[in-house]
Amino acid sequence: MKAGSMQTVFPYRESDRGDEQLLRAAERASDAPVMLIRLRPGTKVTKRPGQENFNYGDYYAFSKICTHLGRPASLYDSQDHISLCPCHQSQFLITDSAKPIFGPATRALPQLPITVNDEGYFVARGDFIEPIGPHSGNAITMSGIRANQVSGDADDRIERFKSRLLEGAGVAE
Ligand code: FES
């Protein structure tokens, strides 16, 4: 996995290993997708108190399920370290504990504590310690982008984000 890249992974329970049906069910679970992100060495990171050891070196794992309405936060901008949910444009700053910095989401993406086992595989050291996706306390509605979040800076960031995605996909603007 290259520094500055993201891969979607589907963690499963060790007890499910070898059982194809259970593994497929784990893969299809709506809260299953996790972003495994490898930051570039030396990237400055702010960690949440109590989660200082959730990463493994430059590798960080966050739920891919948007905390707004549960769609996949599927786009990753490795230059600004932002994960974007295309559904209603929420943006999460990965280098600051995946906290929301724009859009209707009000809660950070939960982080999965990870390490590497003796065989060299990434494993979770435990489950998420907070709910995945939206939860009942999220009072922001689908169209409820907070007025104080709509700023020139944020608009510029979205435009930069879109143009990088187009460049990355080899699509001419
Ligand atoms: S579901 Fe992600 S911004 Fe609405």
Image (tube, rainbow, N blue to C red):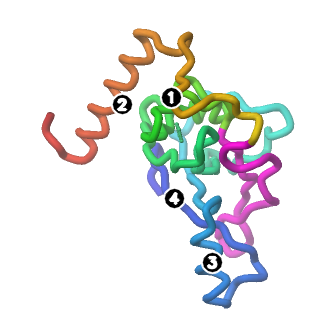
Q: Is residue 119 left or right of residue 129?
A: left
Between 49 and 91, which is closer to the camera in this rendering?
91
Query: How far is disc 1 from disc 4 in space, using C-alphas?
Result: 28 Å
Where residue 152 appears, as percent x and y from the top left, is 40, 9
Q: Residue shown at 64%/41% (left/top)?
A: 67
Question: What is the secondary structure assignment of the residue under circle 2?
Answer: helix
N-term mark: 2 or 4: 4
Give the residue pinned by disc 2. 161
Assign the C terminus to one quadrant of the image.
Answer: top left
N-term mark: 3 or 1: 3
Residue 119 magenta-drawn?
yes
Of discs 1 and 4, which sits in the foreground?
Answer: 1
Query: How far is disc 4 from disc 3 in space, using C-alphas?
Result: 17 Å
Between 5 and 169, which is closer to the camera in this rendering?
169
Amino acid bearing label 1: Ser
Of discs 4 and 3, which sits in the foreground?
Answer: 3
N-term mark: 1 or 4: 4
